[in-house]
Structures are given as C-alpha cells and as structure tokens.
Image: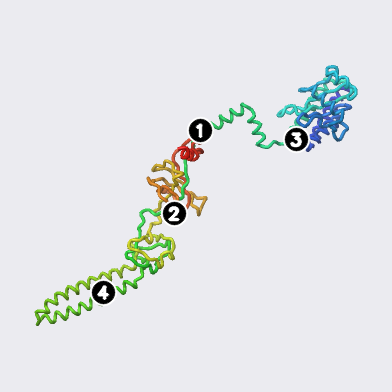
Amino acid sequence: MSTVNASIQGLLGLLQLGQRARAADTAEALGFIAVNEARTVFAYRQAALWREGAGGVVALSGVPQVERDAPYVQWLARLFRAIAPVNAPKAIDPAALPVLLAEEWSTWLPQHALAIPLVSSVGGVRGVLLLAREQAWSDEEKALAGELGALFGHALHALRPREALWQRVRGLLRQRRAWWKVALGLLVVSLVPVRLSALAQAEVTPVDPFVVRTPLDGVIDRMQVQPNQPVKAGTPLFDLDATTLRSRYDAARKAFEAAQEEYQQSAQQAVTDDKSRLEMAERRGDMAQKAVDMNFAADQLARVQVKAAREGVAVFADVNDWTGKAVSVGEKVLVLADPGKVELTGYLPVADQIALKPGADVTFYPKASPFTAYHARVETVAYRAAPTDEAVLAYRVKARFVSGEPVPRLGLMGTARLYAGRVPLIYYLLRRPLASLRQWLG
C-alpha cells in the first residue's frame, strides 16, 4: 500500500513540477527548478544538471550560482563525460567508473546516483540530470524518471535560443545531401517556363491623324483653338500675320487700277489714232499682268486664316509655343485626331530588344493611373532603331488596343510591357548579362 501511495505522490509531484517548468522563462530558471524542486517527485540529497552545449555543469542543488573552478564542479564535469552517452535513466555503479573517479566518489556524492537524460522529441538529448542519495533506485522510480527527463527536455527545447535564418541555412548547407537537394531545386526552378518580356516607354497616339500645316511663309499671329479642344469642319484654327500680305495686296491693287486707267485712255485715243491702237494692246497686256498679281496677293491674304478640314480634336502642346513663331510653307503646327481611334506607340530600347512579332501581347500601364492596365496587340515593329526625344536609340512599336475594351485617353503616357513567348527562367534572368558579356568578349 505504501508503494502505491508513493507512486501516486510521485505522479502528483510530476504534474506540479510540469506547471513550474512551463512557468520558467529562461533556461537558467528551468535548471534551478530541475535540481531543487524535483524533490516533489523523488527523495534525494544532491542534484546536478549537465548541459554540454551550455558549458558543462549549469546548476547544483542548494547553490544559487555554479563556480566552475570549484573542485566539486570540476569532478562532476569529469563524471558526466565518463558516463556519456546517457540515452535512458540509469543507475551509476561507482565501481564501473575510472579508478580516480571511483576513489573520489564517496568524497562528493552518496552511494547511489541516477542519471536522467533530458530528451526532446525534436532536438534529442539536451542535458543530463544527476540525482544522488543513500538509498538504491527502484524500477518504478526509473520509469518515473524517464517522464521527468522528457518534461525538462521539452522545456529546454522550447527555451533554446532562436537561430538566425542565415545560421540555419548555413547549417543545412554544411550537409552534402543538402547541396544535392539545393542544386536539384535550382535546376528545376531554372527550367520553369516564364513569359519573356521587356519594358518600353509608350504613349497613346491617334490613328490616321490629319496634319495641319502652314500654307504660307510667315508668322503665326494667334491660335484660335486650345490644346485638346474638339473642333468641327470649317472651325478657324490659327491666323498668320497679314500685315505684309495686306501691304502687298494694296500695292498690287493700286498697280492694277493704274494699268486699268492707262488702258482706258489708250482705248479712247485708238478711235482716231492708229499709233494709239498699238499702245492699247500693250496697255491691255500690262493690265492683265497686274490683275494676276492682285489676284495672287488676294488669294494669299485669304489663306492667312487656317481652318479645320475635318472634325476632330486639336492635338498640340501649348498655344504659347506657336504664337509669334515664324513658320515656313508646309511646317506642321497641329494634328486633328479622332479621340475614339487611338493606338499605342512604344519605344523599345536597343539594349532590351526581344523578338517581337505581329500579334504579340502588350500591356500598357499609364502613369496617370498606375492601377489601370490596357491590353493591346503588336501590329508593326520598325526594322531600324531611331533616337527618341531622350536621345535613346529605340525601335518604334505600333500596337492596336483590343476591341471590346475601353480605350485610353489620347495623349496618355506610360509604360508598356511587351511579351515575346515563353523561355526558361534561367534564360530570362541571364539574358542581359550574357548579352553584355558577349559584347565584351566578342
């Protein structure tokens, strides 16, 4: 009956000790509990805790701090090394120890000692708890000691210092099998097919725009429209300075009137004078020439106001860029475009060139709305690269937006991602470095 009561008392003590172990916040506090409060489970006189990774003997019963240079601590360190490895609770026979340890046993410890491994299911043996007393250890106590060791082993594993990620990776890479796994994983990942793509600056441009040019040499006096203003056919767009042309017309008109007067006088005199008939023919030819000059000046004066030839939106940068600017015949001033008929014009740098084909997918991300995307398909790619406004050598790419989807606003700027089929990931990552290396090596 007393043995049953002792077993029950030990189990209750084990439950209480488990609560105390879970409350410990450091490995040092847990070691103090192990050597001093295990008496709720077993009766013993001395206890010591050994942890190889923590520097040896880390806790002693009845002592708040371990002095590592003390003779007792150094003797215990030699004892723990002699009984290692301890994989299960076992009673220590002093006679089986080395001679020097066996001779000094009675000086430091009672006759009977039990070594209990602190085992974690994940980390293995994390320490050894030594309990010593005058009475021998029974089989029931050894079985209970196994549970005690598992309890403290699990607690020590939970309180272990967390390794940094790079330390864990370095530990794995020290294993040869890990190298093979890493190499195999990298090989598999490098062969994963991905879409080959490149980024290019792009803008929304009109389809089939009507270019408005200056009809005469002169100076732009005033712009009649604003940028992006809708206009109808016949709407005045801009006026040229008419001062010079008006003076020229006035001079031609006066010359015509003078020639006309001279012709009329010659006609009246030709009725009675044969010589005047010859002069009348000359005066008539001169009057006809003056009329042509006057009509030409009048025609040019009528063309100083340029009107829209068709309906559309006036596309140009700024009114102040043109007001007062001297222009020549045929110089482009603005464009009339249909806002519902737009396309995407991209500029693919030579360094990022990929094998684009008509029908390739394009995704346009406008700067004004970075969370909005428009889809298009490549129509043409220039065979020859040309410098852009930023002095970057690039290929001009034309793409039509997918029908059935909303089209972006005319003149919108942004970034286009151009796709050119699927390639292995390793090629996608090393494409540009290999191209640079090839240019460097030749």
**Disc 3 residue type?**
Leu
First in sequence: mark 1 vs mark 3: 3
| Crowd around label 3: few <14 · some 14–19 · many ≥20 (10 Å) | some
Mark 1 and mark 2 in contact (Cβ < 8 Å)? Answer: no
CB-based contact (under 8 Å), mark 4 and mark 3: no
**Colour mode of the rendering:** rainbow
Look at mark 2 in the image and give the residue it sits on.
389
Q: Which mark is residue 394?
A: none
Name the mark on residue 252: 4
Q: CA distance from mark 4 to mark 3?
A: 107 Å
- The answer to whether residue 440 is left or right of residue 127 is left
Q: Earlier in the sequence, mark 2 or mark 3?
A: 3
Front label number (1 vs 4): 4
Q: Does residue 251 lie above or below 312 as drawn? A: below
Q: Secondary structure at mark 3?
A: loop
Query: Label 1, on which residue?
Result: 191
Residue at image position (89%, 25%) is 108
Looking at the rendered structure, the kind of residue marked 4 is: Ala
Q: Nearer the viewer, mark 2 or mark 3?
A: 2
Q: Camera-side residue: 142 or 304?
A: 304
Label 1, label 4: how far apart the Cα atoms are: 82 Å
3D distance between C-alphas at marks 1 and 3: 42 Å
Badge 2 local density, few (<14 within 10 Å), some, or many (20+)? few
Ranked by sequence position, the earlier of labels 4 and 3 is 3
Q: Marks 2/1: CA distance? A: 39 Å
Occupied quadrant, residue 181:
top right
Task: Give the mark nearest the N terminus, 2 or 1.
Answer: 1
Residue 159 numbered mark, or none:
3
Residue 400 percent location from the top left of the image: 40, 48
| Residue 429 on image: x %, y % | 51, 38
